[in-house]
Amino acid sequence: MFREIFTWWNGQTLGTRIWSYFNGIQVGTDDQGNRYFKNRKDTKRWVVYGGIVESTYVSPEWNNWLRFTSLREPNQTKKYAWQKSHIPNLTGTKDAYNPEITKNNNKQSSKNADYKRWGPKN
């Protein structure tokens, strides 16, 4: 409770909890545990993060809804078989993209196997 009163980076603050209780209607949740709200007139939309407060944990479908790009909640939209699951930003983790590691792992790619690069001594 003490963290909720004074720190915004540990989830919702006391003000957000009170605002959500009196003015908010919970629209849905996602697989990250985030809860999405709107007011009665649907003029404001917001998210209460389930874990780490990081905007990349919001999926593109919910982000569209939060920014009023989509009128329907993502729970009502159809998921296609070709759609992948949302992956948050991996910068700063061991799974982040590193071009040096990728370049070293793919010394001779199959696309360039038949190509010999020109040089002045060739």
Image: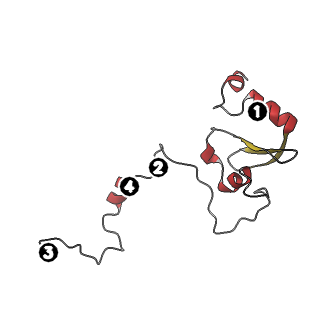
In the orientation shown, which residue stands out farthest toward the top?
A: 2
Q: Which mark is residue 99?
A: 4
Marks 4 and 2, how far apart at CA: 10 Å
Marks 1 and 4, how far apart at CA: 41 Å
Residue 2 lies left or right of residue 92; in this view the side is right
Name the residue type under label 4: Pro
Dot 4: what SS? Answer: helix
Name the residue type under label 2: Ala
Residue 105, percent from left and from top: 35, 60
Look at the numbered discs 4 and 3 and tell me whether their residues touch, using CB distance below 8 Å. Answer: no
Q: Give me the residue at 67% from left, 69% from top.
A: 81
Name the residue type under label 1: Thr
Look at the numbered discs 3 and 1 and tell me whether their residues touch, using CB distance below 8 Å. Answer: no
Marks 3 and 1, how far apart at CA: 69 Å
Dot 2: what SS? Answer: loop
Residue assigned mark 1: 16
Q: Mark 2 Cα within 10 Å, few/some/many (few <14, many 20+)?
A: few
Marks 2 and 1, how far apart at CA: 32 Å
Dot 1: what SS? Answer: helix
Q: Depth-wise, is mark 1 or mark 4 nearer the camera?
A: 1
Among numbered discs 4 and 3, the one appearing first in the sequence: 4
Q: Give me the residue at 51% from left, 48% from top.
A: 90
Residue assigned mark 2: 96
Residue 121 vertical position relative to residue 43 in the rendered view, above or below: below
Marks 3 and 2, how far apart at CA: 38 Å
